[in-house]
Image (tube, rainbow, N blue to C red):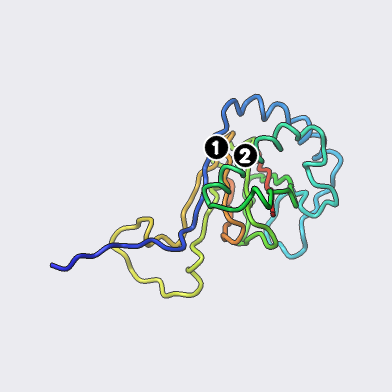
């Protein structure tokens, strides 16, 4: 029998963190979230086919608001740790925010497949994710350029889509080229996420 080895190149790397004492963190930023929802109009881009409240088109990023300073510290800590895992040269080229925005999904709201251009690391923090919140779907970068052969069993080597069920206090980090989408929210409560991009 010949010797063989399965080599894993070009993986889709996802970091899932459950922030310690997230109830305190969310309480600290919730006043800012409520204020933004009252004062900032929905800036849903005309190119999006989905429905939700978002500040992605607002001229001011969330991180410019003082209420979000505690979250900024947590994001930078987690993102720097993720960057070290990827062996990015953050000593010479430190990570820095480019964008940060609020997404609020009501019942039936979803989001189409997309990626975050002109960034290095992207992420999502969930201050509110009640049961029935739409899953985050991470899509294989190869799904659009290859045949979809039948498989006997799904695993990390053949998945085309990986669902991640959001939970309060969860933070997801990924390289910005990774395609993702959001399944429809089924609950009556709002699903809130704070999305962000960082570059070097």
For label 1, the SS is loop
In which image quadrant can residue 188 be found?
Answer: top right
Residue 132: which numbered mark, if any?
none
Total numbered badges shown on the rendered structure? 2
The answer to whether 40 is drawn above or below residue 67 in the figure is: below
For label 2, the SS is strand
Instruction: Tell me the crowding category of disc 1: few under 14, some 14 to 19, or many 20 or more residues within 10 angstroms, Cα based.
Output: some
The answer to whether 182 is drawn above or below residue 68 in the figure is: below
Q: Which residue is the extreme one toward the left?
A: 1
Q: Between residues 82 and 93, which one lies in front from this camera angle?
A: 93
The spot of residue 51 in percent (x, y) is: 70, 54
Judged left or right of residue 149, residue 95 is: right
Residue displayed at 55% across by 50% down: 136
Q: Quadrant of the C terminus?
A: bottom right
The spot of residue 135 in percent (x, y) is: 53, 48
Q: Between residues 119 and 34, which one lies in front from this camera angle?
A: 119
In which image quadrant can residue 30 be found?
Answer: top right
Residue displayed at 72% across by 31% down: 70
Q: Dot 1 corresponds to which residue?
A: 167
Q: Are marks 1 and 2 in contact (CB under 8 Å)?
A: yes
Residue displayed at 61% across by 29% down: 22
Instruction: Tell me the crowding category of disc 2: few under 14, some 14 to 19, or many 20 or more residues within 10 angstroms, Cα based.
Output: many
The spot of residue 177 in percent (x, y) is: 60, 61
Q: CA distance from mark 1 to mark 2?
A: 7 Å
User: Reading the chain from its start, which is encountered first: label 1 or label 2?
Assistant: 2
Judged left or right of residue 34, residue 114 is: left
The answer to whether 1 is drawn above or below residue 194 in the figure is: below
Q: Quadrant of the N terminus?
A: bottom left
In which image quadrant can residue 194 be found?
Answer: top right
Residue displayed at 84% across by 38% down: 38
The spot of residue 152 in percent (x, y) is: 28, 62
Q: Dot 2 corresponds to which residue?
A: 126
């Amino acid at each position: 029998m010949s010797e063989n080895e399965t080599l894993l190149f070009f993986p889709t790397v996802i970091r899932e963190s459950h922030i310690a004492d997230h109830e305190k963190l969310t309480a600290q930023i919730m006043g800012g979230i409520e204020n933004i929802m009252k004062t900032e109009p929905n800036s849903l881009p005309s190119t999006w086919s989905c429905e939700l409240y978002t500040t992605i088109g607002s001229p001011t990023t969330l991180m410019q608001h003082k209420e979000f300073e505690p979250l900024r510290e947590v994001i930078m800590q987690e993102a720097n740790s993720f960057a070290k895992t990827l062996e990015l040269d953050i000593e010479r080229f430190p990570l820095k925010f480019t964008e940060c925005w609020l997404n609020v999904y009501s019942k039936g709201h979803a989001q189409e497949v997309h990626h975050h251009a002109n960034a290095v690391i992207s992420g999502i923090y969930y201050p509110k994710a009640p049961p029935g919140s739409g899953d985050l779907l991470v899509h294989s970068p190869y799904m659009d350029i290859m045949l979809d052969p039948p498989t006997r069993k799904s695993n990390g080597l053949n998945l085309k889509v990986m669902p991640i069920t959001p939970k309060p206090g969860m933070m997801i980090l990924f390289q910005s080229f990774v395609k993702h989408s959001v399944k429809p929210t089924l609950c009556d409560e709002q699903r809130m996420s704070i999305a962000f991009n960082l570059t070097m």
